[in-house]
Image (tube, rainbow, N blue to C red):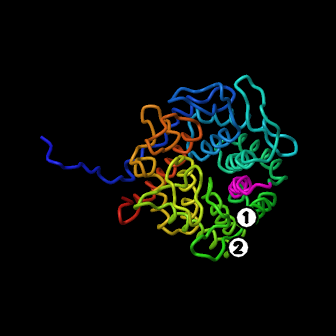
Amino acid sequence: MSIGLRLVPPPIQLADAPPPDWSHVARLSDDTGLLEHARNAIVRREHGYCVDDVSRGLLLICREPRPTAQLVGLAERYLAFLTYAQEPDGSFRNRFSYERRWEDEPSLGDWWGRALWGLGTAAARSTVPWIRREALNAFLIGARTRSPWPRAMAFAGLGAAEVLRVDPRARDAADLLADAATVIGLPPATPEWLWPEAELTYANPALPEVLISAGDLLGDEAMLRAGLKMLAWLCREQDHDGHLSVVPVGGWRSGVPKHRFDQQPIEAAATADACATAGAITGDERWDQQLFRAIAWFLGDNDGQQTMYDPLTGGCYDGLTAEGPNVNQGAESTLALVSTLQHARTLATRSATRPSGGLA
């Protein structure tokens, strides 16, 4: 007999986060690269490959401190794909069919920026010497040019920051990072809308992350403070009843009521990236709380109160809709999950050493 009680799930803990699982990434990969889409967990070969996702895959493997032989093999494959996509002038094609035909012309869209982000991370962090050398060569070719689009420049700037952290004398990387920060610009002084654009669209956390990195690496204290202010403001905007509610497809504008769906995992992952960078640069543990919210978004502390991944496959669901998760498990979403769980692993290690015993 029902007595009208509603079971309330226990609060999510950092210990609830599983380790990064590469199973679905491997399932989506073949001897060419990383296939873009899946229906449920089954790869859709008809949609082919894209530089965007291959770049993300390379980046995340090179963030692994002890990659397996399987992951090193995937990194080599992804790097070969990117160098094949790159033109001598530094631009990149993006879309490659399953029949191994390019479907677009070389240009400097977001994929150019993401390619440089992946290449810069590989050049800086890969445990494999020949991957570092080849990635740096390709990064330097791409760093000779500039994109007219702010987010492409932001992604490229994050790759430049990776190179600069290991080689402060890398002039090409410093110039690219400075130019990326300039294109993004500083936010207005208006506290109601601390953002350099009229609208929050996609990959928003990458913009303050670039300013934070540029301010730190290029010695610009005002830029560092501006980036931290922007990110703190964005975190407040994305707070909904104490949990992360990322900017959905369609974006948000000042003075317009916020809609909550369709939320994309890549936005939660970008929030985690930016908060991890802010915490690492400032040493301020308050950023760990914001990072934890991004982790918890995947674990079910979100507007739908829905777990956003499949523990059986290691894949992440493609979006959070008003009706629940979109259960397709594409490359972009799965890599967003892996990225955020990498941060969860690092945060758990750091929290375990604190006198307070870690995060809730």
* Label 1 SS: helix
Up-down: is 191 above or below 2? below
Q: Which amino acid does label 1 sit on?
A: Ala
Q: In which quarter of the image is residue 103?
A: top right
Up-down: is 342 above or below 330? below
**Mark found first going from the N terminus, 1 or 2:** 1
Question: What label sits on residue 181 in the rendered view?
Answer: 1
* Residue furthest out toward the right: 89
Mark 1 near mark 2, Cβ–Cβ under 8 Å? yes
* Label 2 SS: loop
The magenta stretch spans residue 158 = yes
- Which residue is drawn at the image coordinates 79% and 47% (left, top)? 108
Within 10 Å of the Cα at label 1, are there few (<14), some (14-19), or many (20+) other Cα atoms? Answer: many
The picture places residue 59, in percent across and down from the top left corner, at: 64, 45
The picture places residue 298, in percent across and down from the top left corner, at: 45, 47
* Span colored in magenta: 148-162
- Which residue is drawn at the image coordinates 47% and 50% (left, top)? 345
Question: What label sits on residue 220 in the rendered view?
Answer: 2
